[in-house]
Structure formats: structure tokens, C-alpha cells
Amino acid sequence: MENALLVGLSRQVALRRELDVIANNIANINTTGFKGESMMFEQYLDPTARHEYFPGNDRRIAFVMDRATLQDFTQGPLQRTEAPLDVAIDGPGFFAVQTQNGERFTRAGNFHLNPQGQLVNNNGHLVLGQGGPIVFEPTDTNIAIAADGTISATNGAGQVGDRGKLRMVTFANPTQLTQQGDGLWSAGNGLTPQVAPVTTRAVQGALEKSNVQAVKEMNRMLEVTRAYTTINNMQSRTDELRRKAIEKLAEV
């Protein structure tokens, strides 16, 4: 009976963690460039309960462990905004930004200019071009961003000039990136950013929406809630059996 309670408890802990992940996905349905998450579970076998210690056949007890959180890097739908500094990545890749903790990577392209005329993301981090931060002149108008990330603008004298080229990078295995929050990822040891393939293009006047599917996540939340309730009922019945067994033994 104790084993049944412990196995059920291990499953409930894992389900609670999964419910938190689903709730976070739902909360970020409207977050630009957000990538949905899912849980990866594994079986843990108790090393102490073995069949040779018992007169009859027995099996090792299997518990549930939440091994890791996996990110789904499939592309979300692109939404037109017509804002000249909004940029979406169509294809694999990330924008590179400079933070106080070093270089980070993002799919969120809702950019704007800071008071110094530098291109920054929604959190004020410098958006990096291939030659460093991208800076505009105070009189720049008619900002245009080409599919390869090249940025041009017309200055006060009516001359068109390049302001830089967005640094778009990709990784051999993006699932190894570490999520930093605020739509940012960091590359750990062994992860080297590479130039995004030519098939990846920048789309001006658009943003990539979250790739979370609301209906799918709501259905998954219902499934997890039902599973949690089922295990809770099983534990209640097991506890009731134990109580009755103790009462019977007390009468003997």
C-alpha cells in the first residue's frame, strides 16, 4: 500500500509540473516569438526492491520523474503590422542582441529606436548587425529592410544609405539553447552560432506570433487535470484500505 501511495505521489508531482508548463504556454499565446514547451518524463526504478529478497517473484518499483522541459522551435504564424521596425524571421534562425550578460538570441522582432538612434528590442537590448549595433541618423526616413536583413534609410539630404545588416544566426541543435526569459536564449558550451541559410529571410512590417495552439493546450490541461484527479481518488481508496486493515489487525 505504501508503494502504491508513493508511486501515485511521484506521478502527481510530475503532473503538477506539466500543468505549470501548460499554464505558461497558455499565458504566452500572444507573446511575440514565444516557443511552446512540453515535458519529458522517464521511468525511475527503485534499486532497493528486488525479487531475490522475497520468497515469491516481485518486480522493481517504477516511479515517474520529470526529466526535462523541451522547447518546440517550429515557426509560429506571421502577422502583418506594417510598422517599419517590426521584423519577422521566415525560416530557421534567430536575431542576435547584446545584453549585460553577453550575446543572446531571440525570435521576437518588435524593434524600435532608443534616444541614441540605436536599434533595440522590446527590452532595450541592442540589436546586433554583422558589424555591431545598428545606428540610424536623426533625420533618417523611409527605413527599408531587405529579405537578407540589409537595412537602408533616406537621410535629411535625400540620400539613401545602408545602416547595417541584421545578424541572423542558426544552430545545429537549437533545443540545446538555454531559455533566459523575455524571449531570449543563450548558447552554452559547444553551441556555435552559424550564419542563417539563404532560405531564411527577414520580413519587414511583420511579427512572428507564438507557436502555441490554444485548443491543443486547453485539451492537454483537461487531460492532466483528469489524470491528477484519478490518482488522487486512487490514493484515497488505498488510504481507506490501509485504515481498515489497521482496524482489523487491532481486533485480532
Image (spheres, helix red, strand yellow):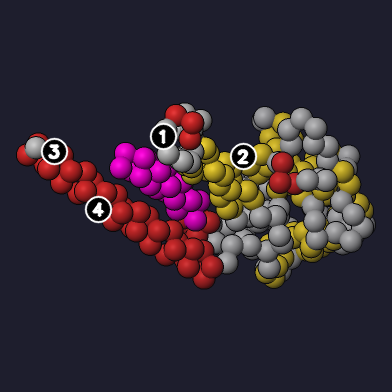
Q: Report whether residue 120 is seen.
A: no
Mark 4 surroundings: few (<14), some (14-19) or many (≥20) residues within 10 A: few
Contact (Cβ within 8 Å) of mark 3 with mark 4: no
Front residue of 112 and 73: 73
Q: Where in the figure is residue 45, as x and y percent of width and height?
A: 52, 37
Mark 3 surroundings: few (<14), some (14-19) or many (≥20) residues within 10 A: few
- Please identify, in this view, whether the residue under mark 2 or under mark 1 is nearer the observer: 1
Residue 180 numbered tag: 2
Front residue of 209 and 222: 222
How far apart are labels 3 and 4 at the CA level? 18 Å
Q: Amino acid at mark 4?
A: Arg
Q: Residue at x 66, y 55 (%)?
A: 72
Q: Earlier in the sequence, mark 4 or mark 2?
A: 2
- Please identify, in this view, whether the residue under mark 4 or under mark 1 is nearer the observer: 1
Judged left or right of residue 82, residue 42 is: left
Q: Earlier in the sequence, mark 4 or mark 1?
A: 1
Location of residue 203 by image quarter? bottom right
Instruction: Give the residue number, with chain letter if any, for mark 4.
Output: 237
Task: Give the answer, above or below, for where 54 lies relative to 145.
Answer: above
List the single residue furthest toward the left: 251
How far apart are labels 2 and 1 at the CA level? 53 Å
Instruction: Give the residue number, with chain letter if any, for mark 1.
Output: 55
